[in-house]
Image (cartoon, rainbow, N blue to C red):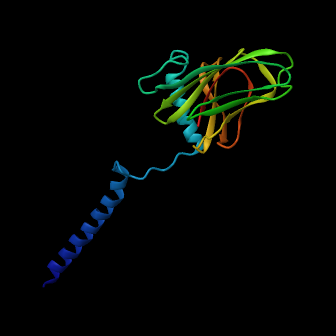
Amino acid sequence: MNKFYSRRFYLAGLLLLVVSGLTLIMVPGCSKNSVSVPLSNDELAQEKLAYLNNFFAPGGPQLGTPLDSCPVLIDTVLESLVDENGANLGLVTENDNIAFKIPSMALLRPALISIHLTKYKASFGPFWLLDCGPDGTVFNKPLEVDLNGSTYGVNILFYFNEKTQQWEVEEIAPSNDNLLIDHFSKYAISD
């Protein structure tokens, strides 16, 4: 075999290797079956925050209103007369266990506390909207929210800012920690 053909086959083989290598590098990034990188807690919170601001800002649905892509799973109101001794309010169903613990001396005067709970099933999983009243109630010691049985690894508490008319991230906590609320307003919790 002469040198001309040997060199030609060598260059063709080299070119084939380069093109094959580039194809292997590009295909996983373009494939629908590519491995996804898990989101960090902050990225997850921002994704859910964008969803809340898109669908549950003032012009969006109110509590208890189903969306085509987000059905209502639970819609109920918890009420209790709470004094300086505190109180426990909760909801226990076959699939849910959520408790609100108001510690003693959190309120110095008796108040009728109400928590309107609506649980939705969104594309990213379940989340709760809470409309707590009387609006503006401030606690001397924070109310604790316990999502018993949450298995998603992290709970995110969102707060609706009345001034900006937008949802904001209030707290991100491991699922075995309670979330803390120091005043009543509108909240959302994603587990």
On screen, residue 17 above or below 65: below
Residue located 81% across and 25% down the image: 86
Residue located 18% across and 80% down the image: 6
Query: Which quadrant is the N terminus positioned in?
Result: bottom left
**Side of 58 where 105 appears, left or right:** right
* x and y, in percent, of residue 148 in the image: 65, 38
44 vs 133, nearest the viewer: 133
2 vs 191, nearest the viewer: 191
* x and y, in percent, of residue 151 in the image: 58, 44
**Side of 126 where 130 appears, left or right:** right
Residue located 49% across and 23% down the image: 55
* x and y, in percent, of residue 52 in the image: 54, 27
Residue located 49% across and 36% down the image: 124
**Side of 80 where 163 appears, left or right:** left
Please count the marks in the image.
0
User: Looking at the image, which residue sits at the far bottom?
Assistant: 1
* x and y, in percent, of residue 101 in the image: 75, 30
Res 108 → quadrant: top right
Res 185 → quadrant: top right
Res 177 → quadrant: top right
